[in-house]
Image (tube, rainbow, N blue to C red):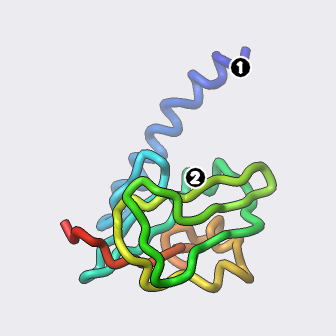
Amino acid sequence: SSAASKTQLSPELFSLSRCFSSVLEGLKYAESHEWIKHEGGVATIGITDHAQDHLGEVVFVDLPEPGVQVSQGGSFGAVESVKATSDVNSPVSGKIMEVNTQLTEKPGLVNSSPYEDGWMIKIKPSNPS
């Protein structure tokens, strides 16, 4: 049954996410599958490898303009894949300083490089802590 197969997948997914968390130092993760990395006074945000894998092939990324204020837990954009469209939420409140314009032409970077080339926005957090 499908319930049995879900139960069998859980430990595997758990160990996979633990593996990624330990490999990628300096990143913090939100329950909604975004990651955030603080560098100086700026925080870079993207979606996790688990999230991109769950979405499948990303075909479009909708990002805001620089200068827009975002709220912690609030949506700042969306990722559209062959399977679904999913909102992307900000783990912190602040002002968007930069967006990854490469994703307009190459949305697949979210799949191939979720933690590096596939970053989405850089924000200046209102509360740096």
Looking at the picture, does residue 122 appear above or below residue 1? below
Q: Residue at x 66, y 70 (%)?
A: 62
The kind of residue on which mark 2 rests is Ala
Q: In the orientation shown, which residue stands out farthest toward the left?
A: 129
* Residue annotated with mark 1: 2
Q: In the orientation shown, which residue stands out farthest toward the right?
A: 82
Local packing at callout 1 (Cα closer than 10 Å; few below 14, some 14-19, many 20+) is few
Q: Quadrant of residue 41?
A: bottom left
* Residue annotated with mark 2: 51
Q: Residue at x 65, y 17 (%)?
A: 3
Q: Secondary structure at mark 1?
A: helix
122 or 74: which is nearer to us? 74
Q: Earlier in the sequence, mark 2 or mark 1?
A: 1
Residue 106, numbered label: none
Of labels 2 and 1, the one closer to you: 2
Q: Say which quadrant the N terminus sits in.
A: top right
Looking at the picture, does residue 30 appear above or below residue 69? above
Q: Are marks 2 and 1 in contact (CB under 8 Å)?
A: no
Count of residue discs = 2
Residue 23 in picture, x, y percent from top left: 37, 61
Residue 10 in picture, x, y percent from top left: 52, 30
Q: Residue at x 53, y 73 (%)?
A: 120
The kind of residue on which mark 1 rests is Ser
Q: Say which quadrant the C terminus sits in.
A: bottom left
